[in-house]
Image: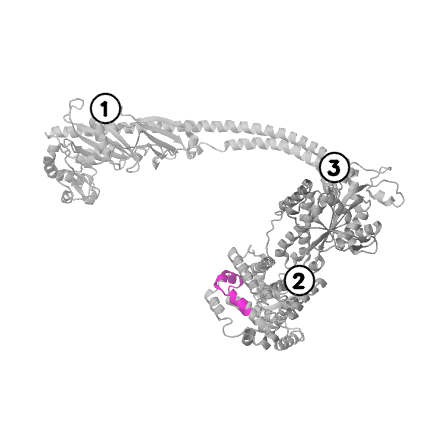
Amino acid sequence: MVKENDSKSDDNSYIKEFDSSASTSGISAFTSSSVASSLYKSRYATPEVAIREQKAVRWSKVLVFFALLMAVSAVATITCIIIMDEEEAEFEYQFVGFASEIVTVERQKADQIFATMDVLSVTIASAAVATNSSWPFVSVPNWSYKVEALTALIGGEEPIITFSPIVEEYQRGMWSGYSMQEAGKWYAESIVAQKKNYTVELLMNGTLPFIHYYDVQNNFMPTPVMGPVPTLPAWEQYPLVTGHRNTMYTNYDMLQFPQVATLFHITNATRRTSMDFNTDIREASNSIMQPIFEGVDLKSKDSRMVGVVWLTMRWLDYFQNLLVEGTSGIVVVLRSSCSRVRYESVDASDQDPAETVVSYLINGPNAEYLGAFDAHDSQYDNLEVTKVLVDLDVDESKIPEGNCVPTLTLHLYPTEDFEERYLSNKALYYTVAVVFIFGFTSMVFILYDFFVGRRQRTVMDRIMKQDKIVSDVFPTAIRERLYDGHKSSSGDDLLGPSDFERQTNNLTEAPLADLFPNTTVMFADIAGFTAWSSAREPSQVFILLETIYGAFDKLAYRYGVFKVETVGDCYVAVGGLPEPDKEHMVAVARFARGCMKKMKEVTAKLEMTLGPDTSDLNLRIGMHSGQVTAGVLRGERSRFQLFGDTMNTAARMESSGNPKQIQMSQTTAKLLIEAGWSRLIQPRRHKIDVKGKGQMQTYWLRNSNVDTSEKNGSQENSGTVDTERSSNHEDDDDLGIVVTTKQERLVEWSVEILGSLLQQVMSSRSDVVADKGAVSLKEQMIGKDKKVLDEFVPIISLKRFDSDELQGRRQGNRPNSIGEEATSQLRDYISHVASMYRENPFHSFEHATHVTASVKKLLMRIVDTDKRNALVREKETQSMELTDLAGHSYGITSDPLTQFAVVFSAIIHDLDHPGVPNAQLLKEETRTAKLYEKSIAEQNSVDLAWEILMGPEYEALRSCIYETEEELIRFRQLVVNTVLATDIVDKGLQELRKARWETAFAESVPSATGEDGIESEDRKATIVIEHLIQASDVSHTMQHWHIYKQWNEKFFMECYG
């Protein structure tokens, strides 16, 4: 980079150094002269012309295709409309025919019912004359036989017919005697005629000898005497049924039914048949009351009304057997001209404002009750067939006030089911045929256009891609000048290869270059990037740079600053070109302050994914104002470049500055002061020595906004600062950044690492059902009867996969996550662990996360065992064979639980570390020293972390880590061995590890099969696991000189501070 080369200070040295850095870094955007040459050697002069011509051709094709499409659409639409109109006409014709048939049949049924009731009334009156009986003491001989014959004409299921004489008040006593004397006779006739399983004695026992009603407690009460008001006792009935408490309806005062009372008042007043439309009883029913007159001359106005016949039957019965089988889907809506009557009210005349309407669905000979509402589909309103079903033509003046005799109207509508019977796919077939014919014609045109225009499209696509490359590399003004065909006197392209070959011999051609006298150049370098990147994977390095530079690019666009290039971790930008700007220094100053703020926000967010120390990265910015020469340097890999002393000085301002600060030259400071930025400029205390410049007075540009009390009252100045503040706030949410503490970010990073490993653990499991009771019992037993050090084993048995299981892991579907509950518990657990780390300079939670990052990095470097390094058991032989140990992982990465356990151990290995060695703890005879005696801090960390994990609040997390007793034991053993491996001072453990090493690697090559081979590989795997944590515990502090100084300073402060 420019700032690192202090051997030369002139322009040429700066350019050579800059070019060298750019070519080696590979990050700056370049374009070759061959790409530019192809732009001009094409038949199109400029991309704008190419686009214009391409649009013209495209529109001509669109017009032709549109004409064909309109022709196809017109013919297909007309064909479809004609056929659909024919089917629609057939559908309407058939519906009207069936609707008329329904209306005709229903009217005949209604007339037949009224005629039957009239005949029944005459039959009863004739019986009184024939038996010389006086009213009300009349009984109809063979009642059941006569009514049964008449109900056959009415039709329907279970119509209820009741004969009730009118009994005056003075006749009630005689009626009681008469009814008890004659009831047995018609009971006997009805039992035989209706084939009832009753006896006369039983029915007589249920017959009350007085006219009665039911009170609110359903008790029998004699109907009170209310002056001249008559009673209407139920007498002969059909069919014969028992009522409340096995009593007969005989002698029940029918006027106690509000519905019957209403009909009686109307019938008595009009001396005509009355009818009621009820939707509350028996689904929806029809009640008809026929008056009985004394004598046989029914037309005589002097005839006295002596009784009534009351008929009740369901409307559903009216609509049975209307159509033949196969004709279905007609909705019949029956409306009454009277409002709905609430018969449960005491006042029978109480009216409900809702209309009285019921709906039925006719399906062939069957009818279905839909409800007491209009159930037809409104889309068929235009096909409605309306006819009057019943109109009794009663003189309304004779109807008592508050009562109504309904006129019933039928409304018939089709349904979609009915319509589908007459709609077919014929219209579709004809339409498809027409479309196919025209489509074939269109295909001929399309194929012709395809073959003719294929080459043209290929050329145009290439031109557009090249235009995109040029647009990304060059400013708009330079790009337009290139598009204008800037040529040499010989006619060759200035950027072409031929020009490049002759440039050493011919320097008379004018290059694309301009002088910009008023600009401000900014260099921004990431301080600490080299040390940080040395401990990261390449993908993480690029994630950081892309995120930071992407945020800077947005700010550059907002403030009108031109991004020149990026060289390594250095970001170069300039204000005042390619479009001159008098306020170039203000724009760059705002941009620099925005970059400084955005740097902290971005690194704070990325620390959750890129690991510890990311938020410690800072920006160092340098600015200088002056003239620059800008243009396109011709030759291979042409690009837009800046030259001049201003570039060198700006680079020196950055290299001699401090992290988190913006340093500027005196020239830039003076321009900003003139622009009203004096409050934000602070001179540096000492002059700096600049290569090739000598001593220079530089200035700092403050990062934080000043208070209003510091303003000098200048309107221009106030506007500048306020705009700066609002601009920064507008950009705060560009990346969705949430301000958090460093520990919270480290916790989130740890949760993401452990969560991804747990996801792999869950995906590697089989579908075997675990014994949760055995697992719970084992959890309670672990650590209860011995110390952690006593659980240390020299060899850990790793999980073995047979070949089918390993293949299933490759092809199986990995779960998307461990679940919200387990993730929440994992986050809570890591937070709890972090809070239990003491505030030691070295042995802290931050140190644990660094060890974790190192362990994870080393595990990623081990060869993937999905392809190699797996111990495979062949099912047929049940023998073990070691597959490809070239990566020396010894099966470690074949088991995700092993990886999780090692990373988990790195998180907890220094939990509650006191900050002093184990030897010092023994000298001080602390509580933990007395308890553990050896490896004190390590054993204490395991016990505390395990105790927290066994809490009931982490049940879901534990079920993700292990499901079986075998997994629990293996996880515990891995944690114990891994954490104890961080104690490299204990002599007993040292001797054991040394002996194990000699046994593992001094022996001859073990057999590939049998127990000896498995045990040997497990021993080596155990050694590798322990060395992973040991190396990570130390090596993470030694990956770069800056990191080495930082962590050794912390270790020194912990030991001697």
Find the distance from the CA under tag 2 to the CA under tag 3. Answer: 48 Å
Instruction: Name which quarter of the figure residue 931 lies in.
Output: bottom right
Which quadrant is home to the C terminus? bottom right
Which span of residues is magenta-colored?
A: 942-963
Residue occupied by mark 3: 47
Callout 1 amino acid: Lys
Which of the numbered marks, if any, corresponds to residue 398? 1
Is the residue marked by circle 3 packed among few (<14), some (14-19), or many (20+) residues within 10 Å?
some
- Residue type beneath disc 3: Pro
CB under 8 Å between discs 3 and 1: no
Q: Residue at x 81, y 37 (%)?
A: 486
Helix, strand or loop for disc 3: helix
Q: Which quadrant of the figure has residue 230?
A: top left
What main secondary structure does the magenta stretch of the protein show?
helix
Between discs 1 and 2, the one toward the N terminus: 1
Against 48, is 673 above or below?
below
In depth, the one of 151 and 207 nearer the eye is 207
- Rate crowding at label 2 as few (under 14), some (14 to 19) or many (20 or more) other CA atoms within 10 Å: few
Q: Quadrant of the N terminus?
A: bottom right
| Residue 323 picture quarter | top left
Secondary structure of the residue carrying tag 2 is helix
Residue 336, percent from left and from top: 31, 29
Q: Tell us which disc is closer to us: 1 or 2.
A: 1
Is 946 included in the stretch rendered in magenta? yes
Query: Is 459 placed left or right of 283 in the picture?
Result: right
Q: Residues within 10 Å of mark 1 (few under 14, many from 20)?
A: few
Give the mark nearer the N terminus: 3 vs 1: 3
Residue 894 position within the rendered picture, expressed as x and y whole percent measured from the top left: 60, 64
The residues bearing labels 1 and 2 have C-alpha atoms spaced at a distance of 106 Å
Specify the label residue 861 is tagged with.
2
Which of 712 and 308 lies nearest the eye of the viewer? 712
Say which label, 2 or 3, has the lower sequence index.
3
